[in-house]
Amino acid sequence: MSQDLFQAPDYYQLDELLTEEHILVRNAAREWVKREVSPIIEEAAQQAKFPKSIISGLAEIGAFGPYIPEEYGGAGLDQISYGLIMQEIERGDSGVRSTASVQSSLVMYPIWKYGNEAQRKKYLPKLASGEFLGCFGLTEPDHGSNPGGMTTNIKDMGDYYLLNGAKMWISNAPFADVAVVWAKNEEGRIKGVLVERGMEGFTTPETHNKWSLRASATGELIFDNVKIPKENILPNKDGLGAPLGCLDSARYGIAWGAIGAAMDCYDTALRYAKQRIQFDKPIAGMQLQQKKLAEMITEITKAQLLTWRLGVLRNENRATTAQISMAKRNNVDMAIHIAREARQILGAMGITGEYSIMRHMMNLESVITYEGTHDIHLLITGMDITGISAFK
Ligand code: TGC
Ligand code: FAD
């Protein structure tokens, strides 16, 4: 990628809504992305390799457990700081943000919320420092949007549980030290199980040939009679609501992250349009290109306001699942449209790795599918406003 010249758009002076701490945290993440992610991310994506060298930096900027209390190694920040960190990381790359989302909201969050003190002390500090990486196994080959139908199961064997089944499309699976896995017990109740690398019968084959999220490793989790010690079950919540509660937190982070990807595409396209001369003038002076750019900044600004307000509600513990769904759906859709329009502004240059736009565009095809597809989030809104579930 050519030099990172990113200038963050703030059309409505939204920085005025942020505290000094928010701005400090955001700027530290922004600088880190410029210094450590932008120079290496294009090559990592081209080679489909997760850049492990960035793990310690992610820990240093507080991206692993931003809102987890400091006593467990987390950064003890509020929800808006968490969102701003995700925005900045995804400005660099959605795959890097995926790693941070999974570690924070899908691994640390359930251990913190649903685990006991021994589990918190054993795992959280190592996950916060990046010494351990985690993954989250909910999706199965035959159960994606409908995780309640899962067939992965645990059987009580007296001294231990026996885990069988398979999970698919799992971010970080190929190198995770610990997996938070959702499985049904003999009564059909969903439980959270902590599965550690090295347990006999547990394998994590990598998924190859992705055109999207290439700098993030994806894989399967296969459980063939894995003996799970009883102390590895998360004791404090069960049922489908347990994994869905984690998804609330991760989807909220993605709503912010998508703004980052959109800002990067807009900023790149604006700079390019001012410099690129056709018909003896910059293409930024052509009405059709101005329409694209003006619509982009309008949509980014609307998303920034929606998401900031959602952050305020999250800080007050008042944000609903449906409000989070609306923001995740709106912002990812907004970002993918902006990526497609921005790519056109760059003409042929837009398809090259010289610029980040095509990488963002391809990444966002995963982001619009994972953590609940675009359509599933629409149906969550539909259920909320009508009181009738379209799923049943
Ligand atoms: P439903 O009957 O609505 O609910 C089942 C139980 O769960 C409760 N509940 C929640 N609890 C806490 N938080 C939430 N957000 C909750 N939503 C629902 C609900 O009250 C009920 O409780 P109870 O006590 O009555 O049993 O469930 P349903 O089977 O009808 O499904 C609803 C639906 C479709 C919305 C849900 O299944 C869904 O969201 N599906 C999408 C699946 C999904 O998002 N998978 C994501 C996998 S992880 C991932 O993609 C990571 S990518 C990470 C990265 O790389 O960044
Ligand atoms: P399906 O559920 O088969 O859906 C296919 C299509 O049908 C979609 O368009 C969907 O919207 C539509 N559809 C389904 N149900 C309905 C309905 N009721 N009404 C209308 N339309 C419907 N999962 C994890 O557990 N952990 C991870 O770390 C993880 N990481 C991922 C990383 C990547 C790169 C990707 C691509 C996926 C990841 N996932 C992960 C899986 C992801 O959450 C699922 O792909 C997603 O939930 C959708 O499931 P599916 O792919 O099986 O699609």
Image: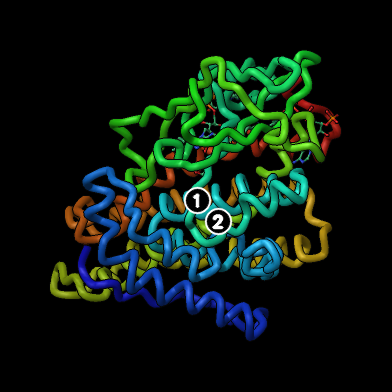
* Left or right: where 327 falls relative to 319: left
The CB of the residue at mark 1 lies under 8 Å from ligand 2: no
Does residue 73 lie above or below 329 as drawn? below
Q: Is residue 24 visible?
A: yes
Q: Mark 1 is on which residue type?
A: Phe
Q: Which residue occupies the foreground of this view, 192 or 374?
A: 192
Q: Quadrant of the N terminus?
A: bottom left
- Circle 2: is it few (<14), some (14-19), or many (20+) Cα within 10 Å? some
| Residue 58, numbered circle | none
Q: Which quadrant of the rendered structure holds the C terminus?
A: top right
| Residue 295 percent location from the top left of the image | 47, 62
Q: Residue furthest right?
A: 387
Left or right, 58 with respect to 3, comes to right
- Give the residue type at disc 2: Lys
- Residue under numbered circle 1: 132
Q: Secondary structure at mark 1?
A: loop
SS at mark 2? Answer: helix
Q: Earlier in the sequence, mark 1 or mark 2?
A: 2
* Left-right relation of 67 to 226: right
- Residue at x 62% of width, y 69% of height: 75
Q: How far across and how far down the image is residue 120, in percent?
A: 70, 51
The residue that appears at 75% across and 17% down in the rendered structure is 158
Q: Which mark is residue 126?
A: 2
CB under 8 Å between callouts 1 and 2? yes
